[in-house]
Amino acid sequence: MNAQIDNLLTETRRFEPTPEFVAQANADETLYARAQADRLGFWADQARELISWQRPFTSVLNWENPPFAKWFEDGTLNVAYNCLDRHVEAGNGDRIALYWEGEPGDTRAISYAELTDEVKRAANVLTDLGVRAGDRVAIYLPMIPEAIVSMLAVARLGAVHSVIFGGFSADSIRARVDDAAATLIITADGGYRKGKVSPLKPAVDAALEARGDLPTQQTVRNVLVVGRGGNQIEWTEGRDHWWHERVPAASSVHEPEAFPAENPLFILYTSGTTGAPKGILHTSGGYLTQAAYTHRNVFDIHPETDVYWCTADVGWITGHTYVTYGPLANGATQVLYEGTPDSPNPGRWWELIEKYRVSVFYTAPTAIRAAMKLGRKIPKRSDLSSIRLLGSVGEPINPEAWMWYRKVIGGKTAPIVDTWWQTETGAIMISALPGVTVTKPGSAQVPLPGIEVSVLEENGTPVPPGSGGLLAITEPWPSMLRGIWGDPDRFRETYWSTFPNAYFAGDGARLDADGDVWLLGRVDDVMNVSGHRLSTAEIESALVAHPFVAESAVVGATDETTGQAVVAFVILKESQAEETADHAAVSAALKSHVSTLIGPIARPRDIFVVAELPKTRSGKIMRRLLRDLAEGREVGDTTTLADTTVMRIISADVAAR
Ligand code: 6R9
C-alpha cells in the first residue's frame, strides 16, 4: 500500500472545467455554501425540489436512535409516481425514457407515457398474483426493459424488490429468496450474452426445488416469466405465468398509493467479510432524494437534451440508483443495453454511443482498462463527439486509465467524475462536481455538498493531510442503508462498531495536502473483481463444500484488467489422494465448482494446491502473506505465524506449478 500511496502522491496533473461547461452546469459553488450553513435544511430543499410528495414532510432527520435513521419520516410519496406519472402529467410523456438495445441488435424506444402504462399494467398483474405492500419480490432478469418495469411495479405497490444479478447461481438465488422470504419471482426464459442465449429460468426452477430443509417452497407462490431467449424451459402449472400473456391483457389504470418515506423500497444483497451475503435495506424518500440529487448534479443532467448511459447491470447498486431510480426520477433519457461490450465486436459500446448520441457516459475502471488494452483504434472507429461528461465507479481508477478515458473517449475535454460510494450508501458520496471542481486523475476528491466524511486513524482521530487511514462517514445521509434485512445486530456490529459515532466504510483512504480523498481499496476481506464485490469467506466456503477440499484460503490479487482477481489456495483431503493426483485437473474442477455454486464472476483465476496454509497462533489465516505470493512479491513479515517455516513449504508448492 505504501508504494501505491507514493505513486499517487506524484500525480500533479490538474484539469479545470471549461468556461462553456461552467456556464451551463447544474452545480455551482453555492451548493457547498448552502450545505455548510445548514446541512439538514439543504437536504430538505433537495427533497422538496426534486421529489413530489403526497403529504409534505415536516421532520427532516430523526436520529434519536442511532444508527437507525429516519429521513423525512412524516412525509408520504409513491416512488414509481415520481419516476413516471409526474413526467407525463408535466407534458413530457413523449420524451424517450429508454433507448433499449438487445445484444442481437433488436431495439425498442420507450417513452415516459409508454413506460408508465407498462408499469401500471405490471402493477395490476402483481396485485392479481397476491403482491401487497411490504411483500418481497425477487427479480432475476437480463438487462431488458422489463427489469426496470418490474422494479417500478413492485415499488408502485409499496412492496420490496430484491434484484438478483443474472450471473448468480441457483444456490445464490435460493439463499436470497429464503432470507427475504420472497413470495414471487420475476425472471425470463433467458437473455443474450456473448452471442448466445444464456438461460435464467432453469436456475430459478433449481432454486425452488424442494430440498426439505429450506422454507423456499412455502414462500414463493408465483413465478412471472418474460419471454426473451426463446430457449426451452420447464413449466410448473399454477405457479408459472408468462409475462406476455398477463401484462398486455391487464388494465393500464392504476392509482399510485402514497407510502411513508421510510417504507422499504428494496433489499440488495452484497458480500461482506463473512460467508453469507448481507441484505442491505433501503427505504423510499431519502433514497430517492439522494439518487435524484446526485444524478442531477454529478452527471450534470439536462433531461431535455442529454442522452445518458450507465453501463451497470440492474443487479448491482449502480444499476438501481443510476439506471432505474436517479435517471427516471429526473425524467432523463437513457440507453439500456442487454449484452456484453464485445458482442458481436469489441467496438459495440462505442457504436452505441455514436448511434444514440450519448452525452453522459458512466462505467467502471475495469471496462476502461479492458478497452485500453485493445487499443484506441477501436473506439476511434466511432464518432464519440456527443460525449460531454464521463463517470467512473466501482474501484479506484488509476491515473493512466483516467487519462486514456479523457483523451480517447472524452475528446480531451469531457470532465471525469470519479464517484465513490457503496451498496450501503445508496448513492454517490464522494465525487468531483462537474463545472466546479478542478479534477485530479486518480482521486475521487471531495465529499458532495451535504455529505461529511473523515479519514481516521484506528483510534478515531483524523489523519493529518498526506497520510492514510480509514474512511468514515461522520453524519447520517438520506440514502444511507437502514439496516441489514432481519439482522439489526449485524448492522450495528458491521458498520458502527469501529468508530463510536461514525459509519465505517471498509475502505482505506489517503488525504492529500489539499484535503482531497484518494481511495486505496478495501481494508477487510472483501475483494473487488471488475468492480464487483466478492467475499473471500464466501468463496472459501464454496471451495470446502467440494468433496476434494479440506481447507482453503482465498485472496484478491492485483490484476491488470479486473483490478483484483480471485486466487485460491487449497489443501486437499488425504482420503481423496487417488482422485486428486492430477492437480491441473483438480484446479479446473474447483474453478467450475465455484462458478456453479456462486456464479461465473466468482470463478478463481488461479487455484494452487498446497500442503499448508499460513496461520497465526490464534488460527487466523494470514491472507496478506498469500497475497504476496499470488502477486509474485517477496513474502512479508512472517513472525506472527504459528509455524514460521510454513511459507517456505507453500512457496515451493506454488513454484512447482
Ligand atoms: C457503487 C459500488 C463498494 C466498494 C467500495 C470501494 C469500491 C466503489 C469506488 C471505489 C474507489 C471509487 N469503490 N467506487 N473505490 N473509487 N470511485 O461499487 O458499490 O458494489 O457496494 O462496492 O467499491 O471499495 O467500498 P459496491
Image: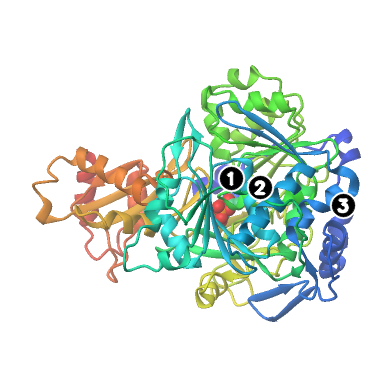
- Of labels 3 and 1, earlier in sequence is 3
Residue corresponding to mark 2: 249
Q: Amino acid at mark 2?
A: Ala
Q: Amino acid at mark 1?
A: Glu
Q: Amino acid at mark 3?
A: Glu
Q: How is the image coloured?
A: rainbow
Task: Say if mark 2 contacts mark 1, CB within 8 Å.
Answer: yes
Measured as percent of width and height from the top left, residue 1 is found at 49, 51
- Of labels 2 and 3, earlier in sequence is 3
Residue at x 74%, y 30% (from the top left corner): 387
Give neighbour class at mark 2: few <14, some 14-19, many 20+ (Cα, 10 Å).
few
Task: State whether residue 427 appears in this view.
Answer: yes
Give neighbour class at mark 3: few <14, some 14-19, many 20+ (Cα, 10 Å).
few
Residue corresponding to mark 3: 29
Tell me how far mark 3 sits from mark 1, CA to CA: 52 Å
Rendered position, 149 above or below 282: above
Task: Count the numbered circles shown.
Answer: 3
Task: State whether residue 505 appears in this view.
Answer: no
Rendered position, 408 above or below 136: above
Say the numbered circle drawn on residue 245: 1
